[in-house]
Image (spheres, coloured by chain):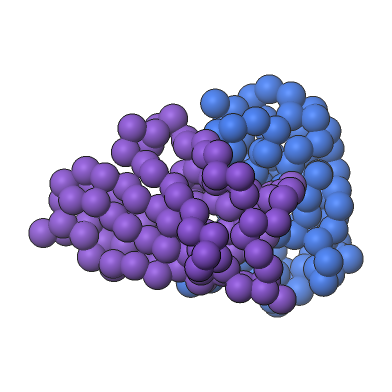
């Protein structure tokens, strides 16, 4: 199985901050990387697919980059509604696997 | 608008079989190009992909659960189902269904299944 490692596992930030979350795959997954946002008690929602494509309806303050094994999710200016847990997932090969999550908390 | 809705038993006894259904509305499950997945999330923990079924009926299961999992599709009802046998407390989780292509979207709201006697 491809292991997906996210870091940090949690972070505290203020509204307006620029936030970067990293996801590393245990082997190359090309650009087959998806980012999700999950709020408490809700299902995850896709934010970014194929590493950098923005899901329709998602704010442009979210962006994704990377290829191969190293990927980043950036929130350019953190908003109150962005406090949530973020997960990466590889869709390069089965079994699809997720990172452990990054919880973004209010500072 | 495509929507998915999970349903099934919320409480299952150890060693029994967990059964869930995902009803799909707003699109036909028989349309090509997508697979239909089950994912689970133990309380307070991360996400685990269980498996998927294609519109053709072919399936793929996570090897960690393969011996206990069956995913099937009922095209007449536009729904797909999950069965997980020989459950233990470790199978307690919120179970989600989702459509898959370049990631999972959309997801159902999820249903909590508790394994307890």
User: Which quarter of the figure is the C terminus of chain A placed in?
Assistant: bottom right
Q: Is residue A104 above or below residue B3?
A: above
Residue B80 at x, y percent in the picture: 49, 58
What chain is colored purple?
Answer: B
The answer, for residue B94, to whether it is visible in the render is: no
Above or below, comparing residue B113 to residue A28 in the picture: below
- Which residue shows up at 32% across the image and 38% down it? B68
Q: Position of residue B98 (x, y in %)?
A: 58, 58
Q: Position of residue B54 (x, y in %)?
A: 60, 45
Is residue B104 or residue B22 the one in the foreground?
A: B22
As drawn, the residue found furthest toward the left would be B117
For this orientation, the residue located farthest to the top is A27
Residue positioned most to the front: B76
Q: Looking at the image, is A66 positioned above or below residue A17?
A: above
- The image quarter containing residue A33 is top right
Chain painted in blue in the figure: A
The image position of residue A4, as x and y in percent, is 61, 35
Lateral position of residue B96 relative to residue A94, left or right: left
């Amino acid at each position: 199985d491809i292991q997906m490692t996210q870091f940090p596992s949690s972070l505290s930030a203020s509204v307006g901050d620029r936030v970067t979350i990293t996801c590393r795959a245990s082997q190359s997954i090309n650009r087959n990387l998806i980012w999700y946002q999950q709020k408490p008690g809700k299902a995850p929602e896709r934010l970014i697919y194929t590493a950098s494509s923005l899901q329709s309806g998602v704010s442009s303050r979210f962006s994704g980059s990377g290829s191969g094994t190293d990927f980043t999710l950036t929130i350019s200016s953190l908003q109150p509604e962005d406090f949530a847990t973020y997960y990466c997932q590889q869709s390069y090969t089965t079994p699809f696997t997720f990172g452990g999550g990054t919880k973004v908390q209010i500072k | 608008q495509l929507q998915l809705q999970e349903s099934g038993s919320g409480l299952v006894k150890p060693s029994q079989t967990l059964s869930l259904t995902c009803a799909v509305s707003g699109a036909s499950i028989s349309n090509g190009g997508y697979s239909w997945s089950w994912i689970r999330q133990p309380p307070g923990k991360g996400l685990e992909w269980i498996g998927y079924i294609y519109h053709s009926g072919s399936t793929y299961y996570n090897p960690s659960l393969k011996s206990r999992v069956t995913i099937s599709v009922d095209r007449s009802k536009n729904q797909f189902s999950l069965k997980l046998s020989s459950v233990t407390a470790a199978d307690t989780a919120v179970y989600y269904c989702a459509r898959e292509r370049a990631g999972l979207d959309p997801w159902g709201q999820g249903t909590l299944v508790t394994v307890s006697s």
